[in-house]
Image (cartoon, grey):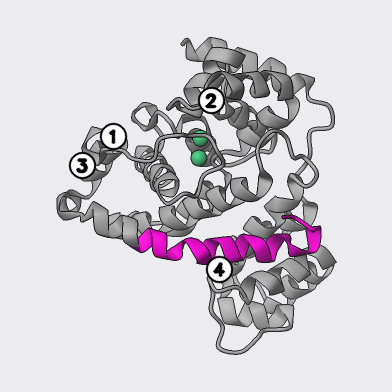
Amino acid sequence: MDKAAMMQTAREMVASFDELPTIPQVATRVIALLDRPNVELDQVADLILSDQVLAARVIKMVNSPLYRPSHPIQSVKRALIYLGIKHIRELAFSVSFVDVFEGRDGIIDMKSFWEHSFGVGIISKIIAEKVGYPDSEKAYLVGIVHDIGEVFLSYYQQDGFRQMLESVQGQPFRLVDKEREFLGTSHAEVGLCIAEKWNFPDEYREVIGLHHEPAEATLDPTLCAIINLSDLFASVCSLDYGGRSWVSFRLGDEEAWSILKIYAPHLAQFDVERFCYEMEDRVPEIQDMVKSIFQDQGAK
Ligand SMILES: [Fe+2]
Ligand SMILES: [Fe+2]
């Protein structure tokens, strides 16, 4: 399908969405503050405390098994000391992002969606470290947001989305292909339009738009390939939101794998099966983290 036509359809769709949500102000301010050199921890703590929901989520998340503190952490400042500046950015971004989608349950189940998104974030970070990608935190954050288009597509195109899912019941399918066939565009193009509206950095936009076609990436194909593979691994580990009815893939057939092998030739020795087992072991931890973030929202 013609990419330009799909982008045009996505742009028209996004323009027709009423009240497109915005990223919480405090989160963007925290991220901007952390970009400054010599930032004081107190300044960051005060800013986080100015948003009580964000502050509560930071404390919940820092106490989740993912970060494993030896004693419960009860204040934002202690959470910041425990995590360090680099991880606060990661944490502030991921917890505040959840708010943007509150109350926008479309056809897809939001809890499964977030398990998939955080799962892809965490697996991306691990793969980034394995291949020697210089910014594993970026891989984590982009992993969390790679499918943002899906939330909007399934929320604003409920009838089309439902018909699409009914038509493929019981058959193997790739969600992105079916969306293009039924809706003339997909969550990748819709996500890209939203990322443009939200002024996401260029590499984020590229991953959101091309995570199913990493070979087309020009800005950072390695990052795109990392997210693409993590997406597949997450699905194999059942961290999926119902977009697929097949759960296996051949690594050698994946274009992302070819891209990463050029970037990191030592990957030829990669033990895929072992990696899948390792990731599967982390699934309960990811599910617990998502549960802890959503607890105060009454999510399932
Ligand atoms: Fe996707
Ligand atoms: Fe995905």
At horizontal 65% and vertical 37% (from top left) the residue drawn is 108
Q: Which stretch did the figure color magenta?
A: 278-300
Label 3, secondary structure: give it. helix
Residue assigned mark 2? 169
Determine if residue 152 is in view: yes
Q: Residues within 10 Å of mark 1 (few under 14, many from 20)?
A: some
**Real-space Cα separation, disc 1 to disc 3, in angstroms:** 13 Å
Q: Disc 3, disc 4: CB below 8 Å?
A: no
Q: Residues within 10 Å of mark 4 (few under 14, many from 20)?
A: few
Q: CA distance from mark 1 to mark 2?
A: 25 Å
Looking at the image, the residue that sits furthest to the bottom is 71
Tell me how many marks there are: 4
Q: Amino acid at mark 3?
A: Ile
Q: Main secondary structure of the magenta part?
A: helix
Q: Earlier in the sequence, mark 3 or mark 2?
A: 2
Type of amino acid at the residue the image marks with label 2:
Gln
- Three-letter residue code for mark 1: Glu
Task: Tell me the distance, in whole angstroms, between the alpha carbons under discs 3 and 2.
Answer: 38 Å
Instruction: Name the residue rendered at 76%, 51% in the picture.
Output: 99
Residue on which disc 1 sits: 254
Q: Residue at x 40, y 35 (%)?
A: 246
- On-image quarter of the C terminus: bottom right
Instruction: Determine whether the residue tagged by mark 4 lies in a helix, strand or loop.
Output: helix
**Percent of width and height locating residue 188:** 54, 29
Residue type for callout 4: His
Q: Which of the numbered marks, if any, corresponds to residue 154?
A: none
Q: Is residue 147 magenta?
A: no
Image location (x, y in percent) of residue 229:
37, 43
Mark closer to the chain start, 1 or 4 = 4
